[in-house]
Amino acid sequence: MGFFSKLIVGLLIVELAYLCGFFSPVLPSLDPGEGWWGKNNKTTSTKGDVTIRPFRISFDEKKLQDLKGRLRETRFFESFEDTNWSYGARADQMKSIRDYWLNKYSWEKQEKLFNQFHHFETKIEGISIHFVHVKPKVNVTQRVKPILMVHGWPGSFYEFYKIIPMLTDPTQYGGKDSDYFEVICPSLPGYGFSEAPHRPDFDPRDAARIFHILMHERLGFKDYYVQGGDWGAAVVGFMALFYPNNVRGHHSNFITYQPPLFPLRALLGSVWPSLVLSKKSDQDKMFPFGDYMKNLVLEEAGYFHLQATKPDTVGHSLTDSPVGLAAYVLEKFSFWTNPKYPHRSDGGITERFSIDDLLNNVMVYWISGSITSSMRMYKEFVDNVGVGNPYDQCPVVTPTGVAVFPYEAVRIPEPWLHYRYKNLVSYTDMTDGGHFAAMEQPRLLADDIRQFVRKVENM
């Protein structure tokens, strides 16, 4: 028997042993716990202030004058010739964006755009939680389904502004009369207009608990749907795990789950992909594995390592310089939208997004001064949960739908997801789009959410 034959037999034996339970991990507790993140010590009342108050986004004139002054005084450097965005955001491109931001960006128009939907805030576990809440106009006989949609980094609630009308007024966008949703889009704590935790250890599990309190206790939904990408995917994933009796369905466009014996699968698949995944379309998501790791870890994980170790250090620069903040954020809208875009002179950032939309997302961070607190999520996750997320081994029984966009950095093949998601209702290979799906491809994402929810409702 040759070496590779022995390797294959050995791997099959290990896989069989795993399926028989010989390598069953010790699963973490699924108790969502409790927390207190306010400035002061927890009060004797665990409920505290439970009111929901209207909230309005305001471009305060004093803050605007400060922003304009900083934009005028920006110090630029000289980029290399012919490097495109391979070294990051080019200085000449950022100067052009600075000029637009200062001279053509309509502050009054964008403030009205932000406030086109109803905004609210409420106090949960000692911090103020901001959320957008949009109800559809329907008659009393129509059933409306509540859905919580959660953003990630470096996004914001603004990512969902194009998809909200498609879910609340579906018949105008190719949906059916039974597809009406009531949409709730919160800001993650420490992002945008949700107050940042005032002590360490706040991670996606805590955000999941807070958002369940928002949906179940504050807004009064007995059950509801959840959807998310990036950190939002992690948060709604924990909600599906912790609250299966309340989360009616869980939809994600960013699943990072690694199946049992992942290193062995990666090793074998690098040599013989068809032994690991039968479909060519699934093999292409993971192999060649060297290219996968090069793109994901070596070229794109620098920001992750920085934010998972010393987020406050870079936070000083990003909080002080609006152009620095814009460059740091917009660079992600280049590679994460399409890995080919950094090879273009303009980074491809306006191929799928308008400058106004890109700057609106940056403005959420600048006005609120939240970029540093947003980056801390990485450190808290690594310190408290771990890169090898032990919760990945906990089975999820909540009906799950997954939308896989072709230019997303992480695309997990469907056969591997069945190890964890015991009720995988829908898995869709999308035709176009990248990481910021709701903002880039709202129609495609809305269609996939609708078909997934129809399947759940008919179960």
Image (spheres, rainbow, N blue to C red):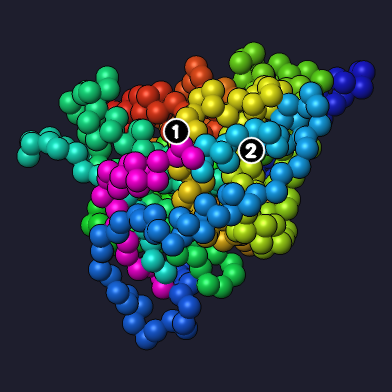
Viewer-proximal residue, 9 or 176?
A: 176
**Where the N terminus falls, by quadrant?**
top right
**Looking at numbered disc 2 in the image, what kind of residue is underneath it?**
Lys
The structure residue drawn at horizontal position 29% and vertical position 30%, both measured from the top left corner, is 166
**Looking at numbered disc 1 in the image, what kind of residue is underneath it?**
Met
Number of residues whose C-alpha sits closer than 10 Å to that of mark 1, classed few (under 14), some (14–19) or many (20 or more): many
Residue 276 visible at all: no
**Where the C terminus falls, by quadrant?**
top left
In the rendered image, the vertical position of residue 38 relative to residue 259, given as above or below:
below
Does the magenta segment cover residue 104?
yes
Residue 237 place in picture, x, y as percent: 48, 46
Residue 307 place in picture, x, y as percent: 68, 54
Viewer-proximal residue, 258 or 4?
A: 258
The structure residue drawn at horizontal position 71% and vertical position 16%, both measured from the top left corner, is 274
In the rendered image, the vertical position of residue 459 relative to residue 363, given as above or below:
above
Q: Which quadrant holds residue 182?
A: top left
Q: Residue 439 bears which disc, if any?
A: 1
Q: Judging from the image, what secondary structure is the residue with disc 2 in?
A: helix
Does the magenta segment cover residue 354?
no
Task: Please name the residue that numbered disc 2 is placed on.
Answer: 95
Whole-number angstrom distance, CA of label 2 to CA of label 1: 24 Å
Residue range in magenta is 103-126
Residue 317 visible at all: yes
Q: Residue 412 bears which disc, if any?
A: none
